[in-house]
Image: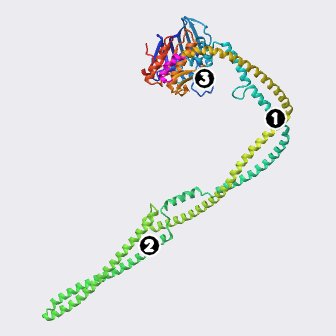
Amino acid sequence: MKIISCHIENYGKFTKKDFYFDSDIASFNWENGAGKTTLASFIKAMFYGIPSVKANTKSFEDRQHFYPFDKGSFGGSIVFELNGTEFKIERFFDKKSSVKDEVKVYKNGGLTDELGDDIGKSVFGIDKESFEKTVFFNAEDIEIYTPAGIEAKIQNSDEGSTAKKLLEEEIKKLQPQRGKNGLIPNQQELVRTLREEAYRLESIQERTQTLYERREQIKEEIKEKEEEIKKSLVLESKLEEYVVPANKEREFAALSDMFITGVPQKSDFERINKCFDEFKELDEKDSQLKEQQQQILNKAKMNKLLLTVEAFLIITAAVLLGVGQIIGAVVTVGMAGILAVYLCVSAKKLKQAEVLQQERRKLTLRYEFCLQEIIEFVRAYKTNYNESDLKREVEIIREAAEKYLREKEEHQRIELRRSEIKSEMGMKNADSIQSEREMARLKQEMANLERQIYRDEAEMEDLADRQNQLEEAEELLTKYKESLFVFEAALNALQEAENNIKNKYAAPIKARFEKYSEIAEEVIGEKIIIDDEFNVYFEIMGQQKSYKHLSCGQKAVLAFCFRMALADSMYGEEKPFVILDDPFISLDKDNMEKISKAVRMASKDRQIIYFCCHDSRNVIKST
């Protein structure tokens, strides 16, 4: 059997794509993402279809994975040769349900129903799972085991398998090896439950009275807890009374911004007031000094005038008298003495005026010092101020400071009271929270009690029915056990016969596996062993170890050899094609060359379709 060609209308990344398999060995060396797995999946889907998408599934299933993005026709066709006859399968898939899929089969160009509804099983003689475990091989599926479908094919005992399956199903219904859903465990549980209920119903009346009393007690306890919770709510409303109004809060914030460097103390204002008082004193002193200075200057000016007149008179007298030199000299000396006296007096007055002027300068410096101190004080608390009315500005600062201190004291008082209330609330809330929890627990207990009372009152009416049900259940349990004994005896006899058949077919499979495993031993470096149950081991240091200890690459080699041995024994001369989807990806270059021998051995009497992502992974050179 071999595939001739396939046409993909829409499947995964392929659209209107044709593939031809002209030779018995077809190698597809495509890079990752090119569609190797998609083509392999398409070939399998043509024979076995695709399962429906399960409702509320969280997995990404094949119908979802390969459904075309453009929503075109989902599917295609495949042409293959079987026993010298050419068949063509056309299969188009629904988005979700396999029931809505469309399938047509052609034989030598004409429609046929020869292959039935299960095309894959008709062509290969095995179900989908068995197909995937023999001739459809990828890197992820490297375990060695024989599915039920392959077991049936190897043993060639469909009737025996059917009988065994029916017996196992019946035994499983009666007594499953796992779980508790069998008829016997369920019936045993029913009998046990009925017995317990019969005893419970007899004592339920006495217990019900206790439940009634507890219900009334819970009601009283819930009432007490509600009162405790109300006390906490009263404190919450009281806390709302101690809140600073928004406008007061804004005013206080503005004052806080003014006094960010500290609130001026009483001593600060006393110091500034002294400066203002000193201003007044300085003004008065300056006025007095100015008046004295003016008087002195006026007297000095008068003396200067008299001095000028006297000098004039002296000169005039000396000229007009015309007396002798002695008299003139005497007059001149006398007048000069008078002049000298006036000059001394005038100089003393000017000296006094100058001293007064110096005193006035000192007053001015002190005035400026006081003024600067006041300005710096005002500037510390106000960015915008009126320098021409500093006294008013200082008064504004004083009023703001006093208001700030009052507001701060009020804030502190409110915060203190809030803290006291919160502290009290903390204790009350702790009690309240505990009360709420207790109340919730009590309400839950109350609900449970009500449900229990309702059930007990209803069940007390069913005591007679429970006793009758118990008797019937015990009789049915006895019948189930008798049936189980008969089915197990029949299954043991059938199993013995099946083992005889299995031993007959195990030898050929083991022989074929040993032929392939000679190559596997070169890869693994150890002797490979297979038993009658198809368990595979390798021998190391005289001990047999399960193949599961091997690396992924080594297990892939063994899995391939086992699959080929199964396929050789399952099929006669008409062997099916084999799809290898890069199963040896974990092998190094040397071992790739070794496994190539096993692949070429298998390709002598069957079609090999090999997918890989790099030439170094290609065990079959494309023809």
Q: Secondary structure at mark 2?
A: helix
Q: CA distance from mark 1 to mark 3?
A: 45 Å
In the figure, 578 relative to 173: above or below?
Answer: above
Q: Which quadrant of the figure has residue 149?
A: top right
Q: CA distance from mark 3 to mark 2?
A: 97 Å
In this rendered view, identify the residue nearer to me: 391 or 369: 369
In the figure, 486 relative to 322: above or below?
Answer: above
514 part of magenta stretch:
yes
Q: CA distance from mark 1 to mark 2?
A: 103 Å
Q: Which residue is mark 2?
A: 275
Where is residue 366 drawn, in percent x and y?
38, 73
In this rendered view, identify the residue nearer to me: 502 or 425: 502
Decide which of tag 1 and tag 3 comes sooner along the chain.
3
Q: Is residue 250 visible?
A: yes
- Amino acid carrying label 1: it is Glu
Q: Which quadrant of the figure has residue 416?
A: bottom right
Q: Which residue is mark 3?
A: 53
Q: Secondary structure at mark 1?
A: helix
Decide if residue 258 is on the left or right side of residue 412. left
Provide the residue span drawn in magenta. 513-526
The residue located at (41%, 77%) in the rendering is 284
In this rendered view, identify the residue nearer to me: 544 or 594: 544
